[in-house]
Amino acid sequence: MTTPQEELLPGTRRALLHRIAVAQAEGRAPSLVAAVVRGGRTVWHGARTSVDGHGPDETVQYRIGSITKTFTAVLVLRLRDEGLLDLGDPLEKHLPGTGAGEATIADLLAHTGGLAAESPAPWWERTPGSLRPELSDVLGEKPLLHPVGRRFHYSNPGYTVLGALVEKLRAAPWEEVLRREVLEPLGLDRTSGHPQAPHAGGWAVHPWADVMLPEPAEDLGLMAPAGQLWSTTGDLARFAAFLARGDDRVLSAETVREMRTPAAPAEAADVVDGVTYGLGLQIQHRDGRLLVGHSGSLPGFLANLTFSVEDDVAAVVLANCTSGPLLSTLGADLVRIVAEAEPRIPEPWRPLPEVDASVLELAGPWYWGTHAFALRLATGGVSLEPLSGSGRRSRFRANGDGTWTGLEGYYAGELLKPVRRPDGTLSHLDLGSFVFTRQPYDEEASVPGGVDPDGWRGIG
């Protein structure tokens, strides 16, 4: 794989190298490797290591821990897109007898299923999966700790259940399905359930001394869909590009956008921290930037994948230590460095190829009561937003019958309908029962409650 380093400016490349060098030195990581993606392609790769004369490149495998969950979520959403399940289905419908059957598929994907964070003792990450041969061994006697759907509570067993669901509906092992349906189509040939040379060894670094201890690399068995995978910065860079753009061989752009949409109720601390969870993806608001991705850790390894859709920049960072550098912060910093030093250049503005006169008639200012809005036409639909300040705003897609459906925010799923007079002229817009008129409280439009016949007035 050839990394086109020249696509970033020398100053940007040095800032990226400096950032990972500081992280590796201060975090005391035996090795740390990183990649940056822009425009769907890897544009930078860097590594720091404690071994003289050798630096890991984009083909060296590291264990990626819970980034595995994002791969599992992709498999589940493929099942949904094929009509084999619905995200609102209770688990019991497809996988009966678990004791957690009232949780929906969406609940499990978003960690709102009420399940425990970990499996019963012993610690599953440092013991062989053969100790947990059945789902009941993973879930325990009382799987549900919280009411289903009420709160976000990160759950490794929840993704074990999702892996079992994939295996049942595909009638094949989870890893086999993953390779056939995701890894091979995306060209991720250095991602696997077990390490393949060249790969890094996992280490624990003593917290108070500069010495190390090798960590075991256990086969996680049934817990594999929650954290088994090994991968490289090269493969994860391609995976990040897929999560930002979609690939119809695996998931459409619309479905990966759904994965990036918040799906879990945020607790007070999460609101303060600006973090939430989608469907198999972590979402955070940091330094004015919306970042999506996932972190991962297993004994001996740390991993992070972070991307900004708006900036079209992604970062992947891998390290072979149990604790040390904060890779979520590091990943966000790498994205920020590139986005700020070399801002995304927008595509040229181009006029619409054609526009229906009845649609063009909708464009311009509208009033909901006394609130001023503007309806604009653009490629892909229309948007409605306040003329000034903050407020409710949304894009809308055409339904083909003269109506429009909201895509986001307060008006997501709501119907926007132009209402015409008997003579065919445009009267007003109806948006989920809200009446938008060309003038504030237009007396010629059907304003609920009517308009005072004496009209507007001052105070004499």
Image (cartoon, rainbow, N blue to C red):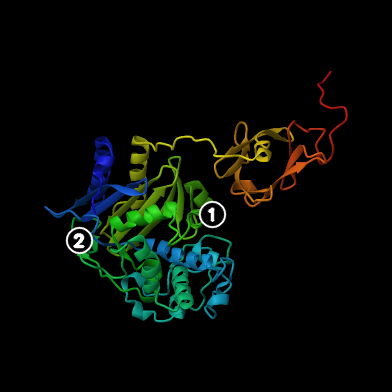
Q: CA distance from mark 1 to mark 2?
A: 37 Å
Q: Amino acid at mark 2?
A: Met
> Which residue in the structure is indicated by mark 1?
267
Specify the quadrant that holds the C terminus: top right
For the residues bearing labels 1 and 2, Cβ distance under 8 angstroms: no
- The answer to whether any part of residue 211 appears in the image is yes
Label at residue 196 = none
- The answer to whether any part of residue 114 appears in the image is no
Q: Earlier in the sequence, mark 1 or mark 2?
A: 2
Count residues near mark 2 (Cα–Cα under 10 Å), then give few for <14, some for 14-19, many for 20+: some
Residue furthest front in the image = 354
Q: Amino acid at mark 1?
A: Glu
Count residues near mark 1 (Cα–Cα under 10 Å), then give few for <14, some for 14-19, many for 20+: some
> Which residue in the structure is indicated by mark 2?
212
Q: Nearer the viewer, residue 41 or 148?
A: 41
Name the side, left or right, on which 79 lies relative to 365.
left
